[in-house]
Image: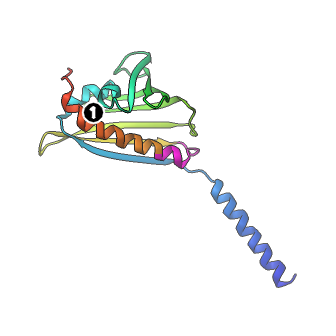
């Protein structure tokens, strides 16, 4: 075998490995956070009920429960986005002690490019000034593409901007 043939064999192996590495999927974790200028106990009832249509009305025009009711594990709800998209979720976990809610996407119209999308919103009291530190994390299955991950990142940032504006105006729920 001549050097040229050996070189071409190595080159072809490198191209195959490069092609395979571009197809290998890996799961992703996306995290965003913000400080909201209200006390955690005033914000929690709205987030517990996933009332994003009240907190972020420029992004979500309607929150609709299709099964169960707000604030109940196992309930299913839909967010009707102002751009026409509709996502349905199932509530997996709620903690009134630790102020978090976890939910999973079960359908989306238009459809998404991911088998699983699970999100947790967690609130913490900022003791210095009685505001709320909010984290919103999302874990994606390994088939999620970068466009979907980025889309949800920017949706979160849009929510945060509106939360900061609208949360102080909301009535206190108990």
- Residue 58 falls inside the magenta stretch: no
Residue at coordinates 56% horizontally, 36% vertically from top-left?
Answer: 112
Please provide percent x and percent y for residue 27. 53, 48
Magenta-tinted stretch: 141-150
Q: As drawn, which residue projects farthest toward the right?
A: 1
Residue at coordinates 74% horizontally, 68% vertically from top-left?
Answer: 13
Image vertical order of residue 20 relative to residue 28, above or below = below
Residue 50 visible in the displayed image: no
158 relative position to 23: left or right: left
For the residue labelled by badge 1, is the local secondary structure a helix, a strand or a loop? loop
Residue 6 visible in the displayed image: yes
- Residue 145 falls inside the magenta stretch: yes
Are there few (<14), some (14-19), or many (20+) residues within 10 Å of tag 1?
Answer: many
10 relative position to 83: left or right: right
Observer-nearest residue: 93 or 22? 22
Please provide percent x and percent y for residue 26. 56, 51
Image vertical order of residue 101 relative to residue 147, above or below = above
Observer-nearest residue: 139 or 148? 148
Residue at coordinates 39% horizontally, 42% vertically from top-left?
Answer: 137
Residue located beneath label 1 in the image: 99
Task: Pick the quarter of the image with the N terminus.
Answer: bottom right
Task: Pick the quarter of the image with the C terminus.
Answer: top left
Would you identify the image quadrant in which residue 123 lies?
Answer: top left
Please provide percent x and percent y for residue 43. 23, 30
């Amino acid at each position: 075998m001549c050097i040229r043939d050996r070189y071409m064999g190595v080159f072809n192996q490198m191209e195959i490995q490069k092609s395979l590495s571009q197809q290998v999927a890996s799961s992703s974790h996306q995290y965003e956070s913000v400080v909201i200028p209200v006390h955690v106990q005033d914000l929690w009832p709205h987030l517990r009920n996933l009332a994003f249509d009240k907190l972020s009305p420029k992004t979500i025009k309607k929150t609709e429960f299709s099964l169960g009711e707000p604030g109940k594990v196992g309930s299913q709800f839909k967010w009707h986005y102002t751009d026409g998209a509709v996502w349905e979720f199932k509530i997996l976990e709620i903690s009134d002690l630790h102020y978090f809610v976890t939910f999973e996407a079960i359908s989306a119209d238009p459809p998404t490019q991911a088998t699983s999308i699970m999100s947790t919103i967690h609130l913490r009291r900022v003791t210095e000034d009685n505001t709320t530190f909010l984290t919103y994390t999302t874990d994606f299955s390994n088939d999620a593409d970068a466009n979907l991950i980025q889309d949800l990142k920017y949706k979160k940032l849009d929510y945060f901007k509106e939360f900061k504006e609208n949360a102080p105006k909301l009535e206190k729920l108990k």
